Amino acid sequence: MLKFGRRILLIYRKDLQDELRSTDHLLSTLVFGTMLVFVFSFALELADVGTEQIFPAVLWVSIFFMSVLALQRSFAKEREYGALDALLLASGERSVLFYAKFLFSLTVLLLLELVVVPLLWIFLDVGVGSASLWFFLAAVLAGSWGLAAVGTLLNGITVQLPGARLLFPILAFPLLIPLLMGAILCTQGALSGQVQAVLGWFYLLLVFDLLFTVLPLLLFDYILEG
């Protein structure tokens, strides 16, 4: 188990160092997320709607579109340089590769959210009077976890297929509908302070995350064989 964890950390560190060494893609995704914030805030200024009611949907639409760009990077270098087979040999068990790529994707997504979520909160002028901030953070983390897990799994399925970049969002959206519904409603409950009313949706998020985190342990060998 210790060796399993070490191999995961080695690949994770390699991917993170590569991403931070050349920040072009990270910055372009961040600029895209920031532009989404400006577009939504400008559009909602013209509409007579309560920002607390619309904020959860706007937040998760922004995170979803950012994730479509960010999560496709998990296997990008291996695909570009034909190094996937070498990485599979180095990792030993193929589930090691999944968990390393999953942690990398989750880290990148959280880094982007550290900038975009506060910006969106400020520009939409969302109040914090009755909000449950701890539950808000838990909902964002649980939603991001599920996005990263599903994104990594789908990248493993499509990495060796032609048109992988087009297939990813097409396959991702139907799978992520329950996650997005749960995340939006949990965020809404956190902002209104009605945590008890949405606990069922939060448990659904946790089950979703657990399912798509454990399932690749059993299936990732067969997925990459394809």
Image (tube, rainbow, N blue to C red):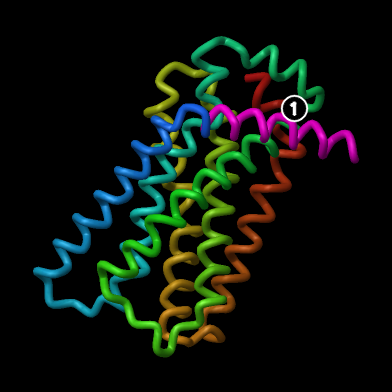
Task: Give the magenta range.
Answer: 1-19
Q: Residues within 10 Å of mark 1 (few under 14, many from 20)?
A: many
Identify the residue shown where x is 36% and y is 46%: 65
For mark 1, what is the residue?
Answer: 94
Identify the residue shown where x is 26% and y is 67%: 123
Closer to the camera in the image, 51 or 153: 51
Q: Is residue 63 left or right of residue 36?
A: right
Residue 13 inside the magenta-drawn segment? yes
Q: Say if 25 sits above or below 177 in the image.
A: above
Furthest residue to the left? 46
Viewer can see residue 157: no
Q: How far across and down, in percent of the image, does residue 149 sit?
A: 60, 45
Closer to the camera in the image, 103 or 172: 103
Main SS of residues in magenta: helix
Q: Is residue 145 left or right of residue 125?
A: right
Q: How far across and down, in percent of the image, does residue 31 sit?
A: 31, 43
Viewer can see residue 161: yes
Identify the residue shown where x is 19% and y is 55%: 39
Q: Is residue 150 left or right of residue 128?
A: right
Q: How far across and down, in percent of the image, does residue 221 sit?
A: 73, 27
Q: Secondary structure at mark 1?
A: helix
Residue type beneath disc 1: Arg
Q: Say if 35 sits above or below 104 in the image.
A: below
Furthest residue to the bottom? 130
Closer to the camera in the image, 45 or 123: 123
Quarter of the image for residue 105 reads top right
Residue 45 inside the magenta-drawn segment? no
